[in-house]
Amino acid sequence: MPDNRDSEKALADIDRRLKALNETATDPTYGEHSAGKGFGVASMMWLAFNIVSDLIAGVVCGLGIGYGLDAWLGTRPAFIAVFLCFGCAAGILNAVRFVQRYNRKQSERLNSKTGETTVKQD
């Protein structure tokens, strides 16, 4: 038979978390969060700029390395094509990593408001 103190503790914890969720749900900007309206235009522009700059940096670096190797070895356009593909892949990988970090920070921020704890996944 479970201990009454443990049950009362668990119920108090659930009650505290429900109150925090209700406060968050009644927040007027909470529903706008998923639509992007709660962050503001500047914040969304910052997010888009970071993603696009990761993609462009990968492509430019790949093209630069490929062009340099082709000019040095005289094998145009073999290395340009190869390193352009590598640059695109690196840019996409960096953009995905950035979005994952951003989402993790946003969920941690939301969890800190509700009092929940999460297990770090890496």
Image (cartoon, helix red, strand yellow):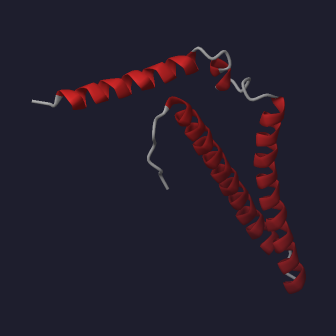
Furthest-front residue in view? 5
Q: Is residue 38 above or below residue 69?
A: above
Q: Quadrant of the N terminus?
A: top left
Q: Quadrant of residue 47?
A: top right
Q: Is residue 32 visible?
A: yes
Q: Is residue 52 left or right of residue 7?
A: right
Q: Is residue 11 left or right of residue 120?
A: left
Figure label count: 0
- Identify the residue shown where x is 74% and y is 69%: 82
Q: Is residue 111 above or below residue 12?
A: below
Q: Position of residue 99 (x, y in %)?
A: 66, 46
Q: Is residue 28 left or right of residue 68?
A: left
Q: Is residue 23 above or below residue 13?
A: above
- Identify the residue shown where x is 22% and y is 29%: 5
Q: Quadrant of residue 2?
A: top left
Q: Position of residue 25 (x, y in %)?
A: 56, 17
Q: Position of residue 60 (x, y in %)?
A: 84, 62
Between 8 and 45, the one nearer to me in the picture: 8
Q: Position of residue 86 (x, y in %)?
A: 71, 65
Q: Quadrant of residue 18?
A: top left
Between 12 and 18, the one nearer to me in the picture: 12
Q: Is residue 113 left or right of residue 60?
A: left
- Identify the residue shown where x is 50% and y is 22%: 21
Furthest-bottom residue in view? 73
Furthest-right residue in view? 71
Between 25 and 35, the one nearer to me in the picture: 25
- Identify the residue shown where x is 55% and y is 18%: 23
Q: Is residue 28 above or below residue 94?
A: above
Q: Is residue 77 visible?
A: no
